[in-house]
């Protein structure tokens, strides 16, 4: 339970970063950490921690942008369940390739659902400004791949959790021939 609460706090901080700090940064530092954190939690932990992190970040985003027609909580929960289905059914191994492809698919799905909700709100008259994507959409993608790769390799190095080469029992002792 403590780890779920920590994941929720981490997600809330990431959501606060995305909605309150990110717009004021220079373009190269406009990374979006919530998806990176959620993907790493999906790859190395349980789905419940990823859901807690995404839900807390999305609630912070929804509360900050209350008058805007954006269902961030709905979008992020659907995104988590799509990514979980992808990692369980298609990417059946938890490797660096799976983590990188998961974060890229997640970024595409996040942009797609934001575009769809923006279009629906524009067509229904909830907003008079149509959704526009980031001009430099590739900067968050570079940050996503770099962060996920760095964290994945650090975890592999420190925990040796994803190491596939295991010595056979007869190779473990040096005295046998």
Image (cartoon, helix red, strand yellow):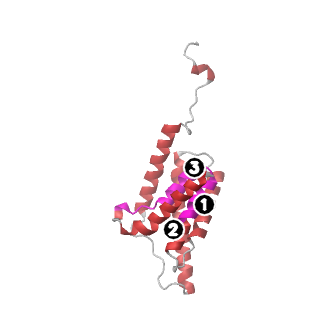
Q: In this figure, which residue is indicated by the disc labeled 2?
A: 111
Q: In this figure, which residue is indicated by the disc labeled 3?
A: 43
Q: In this figure, which residue is indicated by the disc labeled 1?
A: 80
Question: Nearer the viewer's eye, disc 2 or disc 1?
Answer: 1
> Where is the C terminus found, in terms of image quarters?
top right
Q: Quadrant of residue 109?
A: bottom right
Tell me if 23 is positioned left or right of 175 in this view.
Answer: left
Q: CA distance from mark 2 to mark 1?
A: 14 Å
State the SS at label 2.
helix
Q: Which residues are magenta?
A: 28-57
Q: Residue drawn at (55%, 81%), measured in percent from left and top?
A: 121
> Against 66, is 102 above or below?
above
| Residue at the front extreme of this rendering | 2
Q: Position of residue 67 (x, y in %)?
A: 52, 80
Q: Can residue 104 be spotted in the picture?
A: no
Q: Are marks 2 and 1 in contact (CB under 8 Å)?
A: no
Q: Can residue 141 be spotted in the picture?
A: yes
Q: Position of residue 62 (x, y in %)?
A: 54, 72
As for residue 38 lying within the magenta part, the answer is: yes
Mark 2 or mark 1: which comes first in sequence? 1
Q: Residue drawn at (52%, 77%), measured in percent from left and top?
A: 66
As for residue 15 lying within the magenta part, the answer is: no
Question: Nearer the viewer's eye, disc 2 or disc 3?
Answer: 3
Q: CA distance from mark 1 to mark 3?
A: 12 Å
> Dot 3: few (<14), some (14–19), or many (≥20) neighbours within 10 Å?
many
State the SS at label 1.
helix
């Amino acid at each position: 339970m403590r780890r779920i609460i920590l994941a929720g706090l981490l997600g809330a901080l990431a959501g606060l970063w995305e909605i309150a700090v990110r717009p004021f940064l220079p373009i190269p530092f406009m990374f979006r950490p919530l998806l990176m954190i959620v993907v790493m939690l999906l790859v190395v932990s349980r789905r419940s921690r990823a859901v807690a992190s995404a839900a807390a970040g999305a609630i912070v985003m929804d509360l900050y942008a209350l008058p805007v027609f954006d269902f961030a909580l709905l979008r992020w929960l659907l995104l988590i369940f799509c990514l979980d289905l992808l990692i369980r059914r298609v990417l059946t191994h938890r490797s660096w390739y799976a983590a990188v492809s998961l974060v890229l698919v997640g970024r595409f799905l996040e942009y797609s659902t934001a575009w769809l909700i923006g279009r629906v709100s524009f067509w229904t008259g909830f907003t008079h400004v149509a959704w526009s994507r980031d001009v430099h959409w590739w900067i968050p993608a570079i940050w996503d791949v770099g962060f996920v790769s760095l964290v994945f390799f650090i975890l592999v190095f420190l925990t040796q959790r994803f190491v596939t080469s295991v010595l056979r029992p007869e190779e473990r002792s040096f005295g046998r021939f």
